[in-house]
Amino acid sequence: MTQGGPDQPHPPVPAAWLDNPGLIAPPHQVRLSAPLVLDCGRTLPGAIVNFETYGTLSPRRDNAILVCHSLTHRAHAAGRRAPGDARPGWWHGAIGPGKLLDTNRYFVICADALAAGGSTRPASVEEATGRRYAMRFPVITVRDMVNLQHLLIERLGIARLHAVIGGCLGGQQAIEWAICHPEVIQNAVVITTTPATSAHSIAIFAVMRHLIRADPDWRAGDYYGTSFPRAGLNAAVAAAVPLWMSREAMEQRFGRRTASHKEHEEEATYSYTLESEFEVESFIDALVARARHELDPNGLMYLMRAVEYFDLEHEYGDLAQAFKPVTARVLFVSYRRDWRYPAAETDRMHRALAAAGGDSRHRVLDSQLGHGAFLFDVPGLAAEVTSFLDEAS
Amino acid sequence: MTQGGPDQPHPPVPAAWLDNPGLIAPPHQVRLSAPLVLDCGRTLPGAIVNFETYGTLSPRRDNAILVCHSLTHRAHAAGRRAPGDARPGWWHGAIGPGKLLDTNRYFVICADALAAGGSTRPASVEEATGRRYAMRFPVITVRDMVNLQHLLIERLGIARLHAVIGGCLGGQQAIEWAICHPEVIQNAVVITTTPATSAHSIAIFAVMRHLIRADPDWRAGDYYGTSFPRAGLNAAVAAAVPLWMSREAMEQRFGRRTASHKEHEEEATYSYTLESEFEVESFIDALVARARHELDPNGLMYLMRAVEYFDLEHEYGDLAQAFKPVTARVLFVSYRRDWRYPAAETDRMHRALAAAGGDSRHRVLDSQLGHGAFLFDVPGLAAEVTSFLDEAS
């Protein structure tokens, strides 16, 4: 569904949405006629949003849940692109019949964020100039992403979202949704999110930017159609491993095991080589080898910058001020071992929202996986989220 | 002092060592005639050791303290290379008259580790082939480094070291010294060292190796005289920042301050740019810009590998077995906020040594700086070390 022309306030719902039990997800695209005014002051005309949906929109259009994706994920959140597809969407464990987001009950929407995937992004052609934006793309914020999604929801004729949910960058979007569009959001699930992005995350993102830009094939961002900064992206992917995998998780998963450990257990000796010998090395090699080239390096840099700019106190003065408009019920979820987004910082949001009279709760879960737990360790999260959403029904 | 020929058991002490109060440190070099047999099974003939000394060797030669350096440091530990030198040695705060290692009392030696600085290293010419080792250099271990230093100490006619001291890789050397050459070591100060290098450190080193080797100027290691993998080394330096600087230290030092914060305090707004704007970004830029090109990328890779191979339980079966030969008094020092080398893991060594009948103590210090605290936060460390060494005198 690619449509131009003026937005219709309540367009007919495509037939495909009404019967999608198999989670074979066709991407949809809309082109918005309303210009998107950005935090930086610039305006994006005719922005495109690429999205997928799972489950069936109710006749009253009151069962929609918006999933906001994180830095390296995209609209393809669940199901398979085709029946034989080996790799389902990034939150397949959480979206489907009887799952955390039960598609027997809910109509789940996941859209490519602004600057990501198939939505308007640095690789898009700028209408005014006829060339791709590349580094001329405006610097965007999490709030800009939310405002683009808001235009999408309006365009789909959905006045209220039953819930918005996301972790990390997705959680930053979820809380901004509750702040910026309170009339739309009934419930918000904000996972592994702190009031502001840490200097530590900024540092790692800065390193990743440095690595991408150092690749001669980056060509100041104008590589489209001529080259691809593959080495730079590979390097950035490698450098990010200690960002999303905690020390503890690495010890648990790999420890000091070597290839020879596996074969001989007690007999393990070193190979005295600089080639990969420890399992954790092979893990990094594999990550680099299958570096996800569906990631556009320019787009990644813009998304990282949006995360870096996220700082509710900077945006709104203080948390009390930030949460004044919020009417949604809010569930904050953090993980005890998430050293990058500590539960204590999430709790500051919860307490500020509760103090502002908001309907807030904060659950601290435990998982070996720390920050990435919401992606893979779904059962513990599901218990909290489903009871939270059930109470709302 | 560069000498060839057979080792003399008690060579005369150079006059320069006997009066070096100004800490203007001339590097010394010895070439060892005894071949160095390595853990990997290969032998290094005619190894060279480059070292510096501070203070005066006593007539009884009983006041020598060996300082073992860490990954990116070298023999130049204190003082200035010339009177006007703006950048003193890496542990200048700890070595000198009245300091942690008081050069009025002690004769302090710091040698370039095997594979580092001016000691035998990948850039050295292999006698048998007449060409530089490069990646044909043998893979070395911390024990190999210690054994090379042992040959140096013998060569200097010093039968007993009053103490050996080091942090991180230096601490790994200090404890191996106490294990491998108990007859030499009276006291050992082992700082920020755990029984084995973590998977997390291996992962970051693997990333750094990947970045160096991905640079086309690396030329499979044979870049000497033709090129220099500057981009790869810069990238590795950048990627290492989150290794040695903790999340907490970054928040403390930089937080989310931007350049505009500094000028206008409350008025700070974002510039909406991908260029460096946060102070932590400028910090990384500066590190990359002045990347320490006295580091040889090949040498760095060999040193990292030695650190990765460090695992007392792997080497000796278990800690009890490892510590059986130890006769030295041992002081373990760790830092409460050193998330990479946790105090609890250091304590395993202390308890095993004490259980084996060893004279051991473990002090857990507190410092914002975490792992790097021993380098910069000297006073707290000095109190512990000087009282430990005083008790021994």
Image: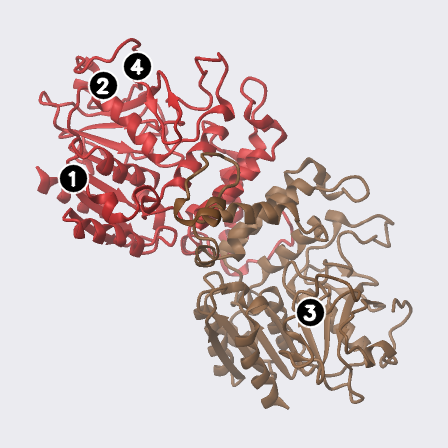
Chain colours: A brown, B red
Q: Residue at x 62, y 76 (%)?
A: A179
Expressed as whole percent of the image width and height from the top left, the position of residue B202 reads: 46, 45
The residues tagged by marks 3 and 2 sit, at their Cα atoms, a distance apart of: 70 Å
Write down the chain letter for disc 3.
A
- Number of other residues with Cα within 10 Å of mark 2, as a class: few under 14, some 14 to 19, many 20 or more: many
Per the image, the residue denoted by label 3 is: A146
Q: Give the residue pinned by disc 4.
A: B33
Q: CA distance from mark 4 to mark 1?
A: 29 Å
Q: Position of residue B94 (x, y in %)?
A: 25, 37
Determine if marks 4 and 2 fall on one subunit: yes
- Answer few, some or many: residues within 10 Å of disc 1's Cα (few below 14, many 20 plus, some between 14 and 19): many
The label nearer to you, 3 versus 4, is: 4
Marker disc for residue B328:
1
Q: Is residue B62 left or right of residue A281?
A: left
Nearer to us in this view, B132 or B19:
B132
Dot in front, 4 or 2: 4
